[in-house]
Amino acid sequence: NQMELAEILKTKLSTFFAGIGIKITDFNLENFSLPENVTKALDDSSALGFRRRNLDIELQLAQADAMKAAAGNPGMGGAGMSLGVGLAFGQQVVSGIKPVAPASTVAPTATIRCPKCNASIPVNSKFCPECGEKITASGKKFCPECGTENPAEAKFCKDCGHKF
């Protein structure tokens, strides 16, 4: 950006000129030119980047131009060229059509309910991902105070009364 460059130059030059008693109050950068080879390299690089992003369009345009040129050629060479380009174009059209994916046939994952927070969790979970409760294979829970096995839906331990 020319304005940003002008501001940087103003700052740098102000320091230098302040040493000899001159104050720069404003600095405008009207124009600057790059050497011709640098300008050409930037233009080529930009064009290449555009072509890379739009390669399929570029190929289609080239095929259309080839078909036009072949149609104007008399004789069998032009007809063969038209046929080859036409087939290639048709192949591109067909390959561009994507088949519709079939409906998912994956079976839903079996779940159980966490005895502490009632979250739906996969059957083979060892801990609840929501509350961290240890899940036992039998679907029962153990009291952290006395170790007694309790039903999964119990809110209190049946032996010591500890609240789950």
Image (cartoon, grey):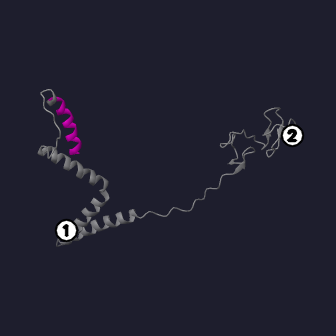
Q: Look at the image and give the residue range highlighted in magenta.
A: 1-16
> What numbered label is drawn on residue 69?
1
Residue 43, position in %: x, y? 19, 50
Element on which disc 2 rests: loop
Quarter location, residue 20:
top left
Residue 158, given in percent of the width and then of the height, sits at 87, 40
| Residue visible at 58% across and 59% down in the picture | 104
Residue 13 part of the magenta segment? yes
Secondary structure character of the magenta stretch overall: helix
Question: Viewer-proximal residue, 110 or 4?
Answer: 4
Residue drawn at 19 percent across, 41 percent down: 6
Q: Secondary structure at mark 1?
A: helix
Place of residue 86 in the rendered image (x, y in percent of width and height, measured from the top left): 29, 68
Of badges 1 and 2, the one in the foreground is 2
Circle 2: is it few (<14), some (14-19), or many (20+) Cα within 10 Å? some
Q: Quadrant of the N terminus?
A: top left
Image-based side of 85 in relation to 119, left or right: left
Above or below: residue 87 compared with residue 35 = below
Q: Quadrant of residue 124?
A: top right
Among numbered discs 1 and 2, the one appearing first in the sequence: 1
Q: Is residue 123 magenta?
A: no
106 left or right, relative to 9: right
Residue 46 x %, y %: 24, 50
Amino acid type, callout 1: Ala
Residue furthest to the top in view is 19
Tag 2: amino acid? Lys
Q: Specify few, some or many for label 1: CA neighbours under 10 Å numbering under 14, 14-19, or 20 or more.
A: few
Q: Is residue 120 above or below residue 57?
A: above
CA–CA distance in space, label 1 to label 2: 91 Å
* Nearer to me, 122 or 115: 115
Q: Quadrant where the C terminus lies?
A: top right
Give the labeled residue for mark 2. Answer: 158
